[in-house]
Amino acid sequence: MLKEILDRMEEEAKKRKAPIFLHNTRLEPYQILIATILSARTRDGQTAKAVERLFSKAKSLEELAEMSVEEIEDLIKSVGFYRIKVRRIKELARILKEKGIPDNFEDLIKLPGVGRKTANIFLSYIGKPAIAVDTHVHRISNRLGIVNTRNPRETEEALKNIFPVDLWQRINYVFVGFGQTVCLPRKPLCDECPVSDYCKKVGVKKEISESEGK
Ligand code: SF4
């Protein structure tokens, strides 16, 4: 049931060319950390442009660490709070260059600019079981009625109890793609939604069975 919901959402989001599915270039793990930091409080399109500009100039972690604050600022100033982010990126690049990239949650969240969401996105990206909850995941899970939570942290815990581990990696990108195209923040396209029959917001017609993964 939960897999079917994810499948339907992914198919629809891809059909509608959700921005998250349009990036063909596979980023390096360190680039995923930086890109997620850049994405905070910034529109997807602006983040994508800044990421492309930054990594077409800085071809490696070493090159990024060597760049000046001014150079990086010039490349990423389309994103929100870019002055703060530049300093975090500089410091992050220096640490990663010296110590390597951690592959566990506890060490990741000690890095500058890396919070819970960024750490989970990174862990998912490198194939570790994690659920990254951003604004799309939090909003859509609650609208559907899969969870009833007040904040992303609660949503993350609730989703971990509901979804089987083998689906965790898909949750973020499917929900983001679906949130970019169908379950929009202000005016969701409920009349065109492929999972409306499961959605609490429009009146559930099919019950989502609980705890499939337990
Ligand atoms: S029916 Fe509407 S609110 Fe529910 S998941 Fe679909 S688009 Fe979102």
Image (cartoon, rainbow, N blue to C red):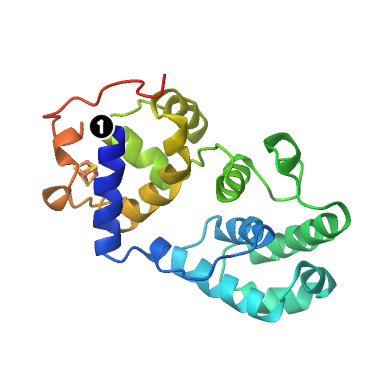
Q: Please tell me whether residue 189 is drawn above or below residue 148 in the rendered image.
A: below
In this view of the protein, which residue sits in the foreground, 165 or 195? 165
Q: Quick one: label 1, few (<14), some, or many (20+) residues within 10 Å? A: few
Residue 152 horizontal/vertical position (percent): 48, 35
Q: Is residue 22 left or right of residue 54?
A: left
x, y percent for residue 91: 81, 58
Q: What residue is rendered at 24% in x and 63% in y?
A: 15
93 vs 177, left or right, is right
Q: Is mark 1 within 8 Å of ligand 1?
A: no
Residue 37, quarter of picture: bottom right
Residue, x 77% and y 77% (percent of image)? 70
Ligand 1 is found in the corner quadrant, namely top left
Which amino acid lies under the numbered mark 1 shown in the image of this protein? Met
Q: Where is residue 16 shown, x and y percent of the image?
A: 25, 64
In this view, 97 is above or below 173:
below
Residue 56 image offset from top left, x and y in percent: 64, 80
In the rendered image, which quarter contains the N terminus?
top left
Question: What residue sits right under mark 1 in the picture?
Answer: 1
Above or below: residue 13 compared with residue 142: below
Q: Quadrant of the C terminus?
A: top left
Instruction: Examine the image and state in which quarter residue 62 appears.
Output: bottom right
